[in-house]
Image: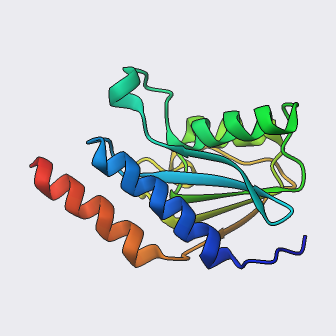
Amino acid sequence: MIQPFGDEHFMKQAYLEAQKALAEDEVPVGAVVVANGKIIGRGHNLTERLKDVTAHAEMQAITAAASYLGGKYLHKCTLFVTLEPCSMCAGALYWSQIERVVFAAPDPKRGFSTQGGKLHPKTKLNSGILRNECSELLLNFFRQKR
């Protein structure tokens, strides 16, 4: 899949979504779904505002992308997210059959890789792009909460 913009460009867009979450006093996680070099879904955490534990950034972006495409499968799409997806989001990504997932910061406590979640066998996984910036955003948020 050839993209006119690189992974860093799209992770910066996910980071902008995370900043929207921060402005709403939500855990600052943001996500975008990209197809053919175009963002087709955006999302940021809305769990507090919606009082919905499933309103994670990834879920918002997956729903928006599926709506844009008019179907439930995200073939030939990439999700860029600022934090490693949890098991719930990994399950949704599994069922969407997304081609690729790129996350910035690992989540050693709740990330799918440590909690037994898994992605679709054909999904490619990359991590670390803008890791420091995304990690710092989260760390600062939680420092202010304590």
Horizontal and vertical percent for residue 63?
68, 33
Horizontal and vertical percent for residue 15?
47, 63
In this orientation, which residue lies closer to the viewer: 76 or 107? 76
Horizontal and vertical percent for residue 46?
42, 34
Q: Residue at x 63, y 68 (%)?
A: 10
Q: Residue at x 33, y 29 (%)?
A: 48
Q: Residue furthest left?
A: 146
- The vertical placement of 58 against 135, above or below, is above
In this orientation, which residue lies closer to the viewer: 51 or 12? 12
Q: Residue furthest top?
A: 51
Q: Quadrant of residue 67?
A: top right
Horizontal and vertical percent for residue 22?
31, 50
Image side of residue 123 versus residue 8, left or right:
right
Q: Residue at x 89, y 56 (%)?
A: 76
Q: Quadrant of the N terminus?
A: bottom right
Q: Residue at x 46, y 61 (%)?
A: 16
Image side of residue 69 versus residue 50, left or right:
right
Image side of residue 18 versus residue 101, left or right:
left
